[in-house]
Amino acid sequence: PTLMVPAAAPPPPASLVLTQDDLKKIAAYKAVEHVKSGMVLGLGTGSTAKHAVNRIAQLLNQGKLKDIVGIPTSSTTHEQAVNLGIPLSDLDSHPVIDLAIDGADEVDPELNLVKGRGGSLLREKMVESASKKFVVIVDESKLVNYVGGSKLAMPVEVIPFCWSHSLNRLVALFADSGCVGELRKCVTGEKAYVTDNGNYIIDLYFERDIGDLNEASDAILRLPGIVEHGMFIGLATSVIVAGVDGVTVKTK
Ligand code: 5RP
C-alpha cells in the first residue's frame, strides 16, 4: 500500500530567502548610516566589512559623503579601497579615528569578540583600539555564550622563529580548557599562512570556557614570541546583528 505523507510546505520564493551574505550586507549598510562627512574611518577586513567599504565608496561617489579618510586594516582592504577611490591614510598621520566598522568571528554577551580568522587581527586591533567608536557588524551566526564558545579557531599572531615552541607554550597555558592548537596554512599547499606583518598564525581551539578573558590575554601576551591575539576585550562600542527576523543593535 502507498503511505500518504502530508505535503511539505512549499519553500518561500527565492527572492525572500536571505542568505548569510545578505545578512552581512544588511548589518554593514546599517553601520554606514553612522558615517558622516569629514570623518576618519577605520575600514575593517572580511566578507562583512567588504560590504561596508563598498557602501562608503558608493555614498562618496554619489556626493552624499565628503572628505572621508579611510584607515585600512589589511592589505586586502587597502587594495579594495584604492580600487573604489576612497582616500586613504594611516595611523601615523591620523592617530585618532572617529569610527571603525568591522566584522567579527564571535561576539559574546558582553560584546567581547574573537577576530582574526581572516588573518588581520593585529592591524584590526591597532586601528580599532585607536577609534572613538568601534561598530561591529555580524550576522546572527556569530553570537556565542562565551569567547571560544563556537569551538572554532581563536587566532594568535606569532613571530615565525620557533613557532612550534610558541604553539606548545600557548596550548600549555590553556590545558585546563582542553586546548589544542595548529599552525595556520595557506589554502593552497602546505606552506604556512603569512600575515600582512610577515608573521604566522596559531589557531587555538578550546573544549571548555577559558575563564577570565583579561587574565587569558595577559598570560598570552607575556609569552615571548607572541605578537597579538584575536580576543578583542571591551573594544566594541556597539554590535549590529542582522538576523532573519531583523536587525538588533547591542550596546554596552
Ligand atoms: C579578519 C576578521 C574578520 O572581521 C572576521 O574574520 C569576520 O570575517 P567575515 O566578515 O568574513 O565573517 O577578523 O581578520
Image (tube, rainbow, N blue to C red):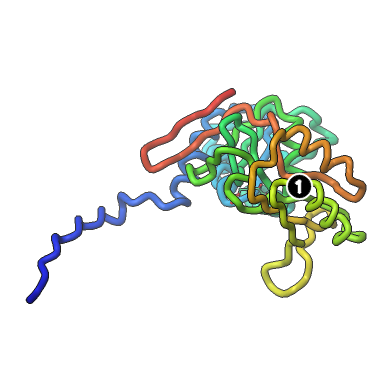
For residue 40, which quarter of the picture? top right
Look at the image and tell me in which quarter the N terminus lies.
bottom left
For residue 36, which quarter of the picture? top right
Please name whichever residue, 77 or 66, is drawn nearer the observer in this view of the structure: 77
Asked if residue 87 lies left or right of residue 126, the reply is left
Q: Residues within 10 Å of mark 1 (few under 14, many from 20)?
A: many
Residue visible at 63% across and 40% down in the picture: 147
Residue visible at 79% across and 54% down in the picture: 196
For residue 222, which quarter of the picture? top right
Please name whichever residue, 8 or 34, is drawn nearer the observer in this view of the structure: 8
Q: Position of residue 184 (x, y in %)?
A: 73, 62
Please name whichever residue, 69 or 77, is drawn nearer the observer in this view of the structure: 77
Residue visible at 71% across and 29% down in the picture: 131
Q: Disc 1 on helix, strand or loop?
A: loop
Q: Is residue 158 visible?
A: yes
Q: Position of residue 71 (x, y in %)?
A: 73, 39
Judging by the rendered image, the residue that carries numbered circle 1 is 174
Q: Is residue 35 visible?
A: no
Compared with 146, 160 (above or below) is below
Asked if residue 204 lies left or right of residue 111, the reply is right
Residue type of the residue flagged with mark 1: Phe
> Ligand 1 closer than 8 Å to the CB at disc 1?
no
Q: Position of residue 166 (x, y in %)?
A: 86, 55
Number of numbered labels in the structure image: 1
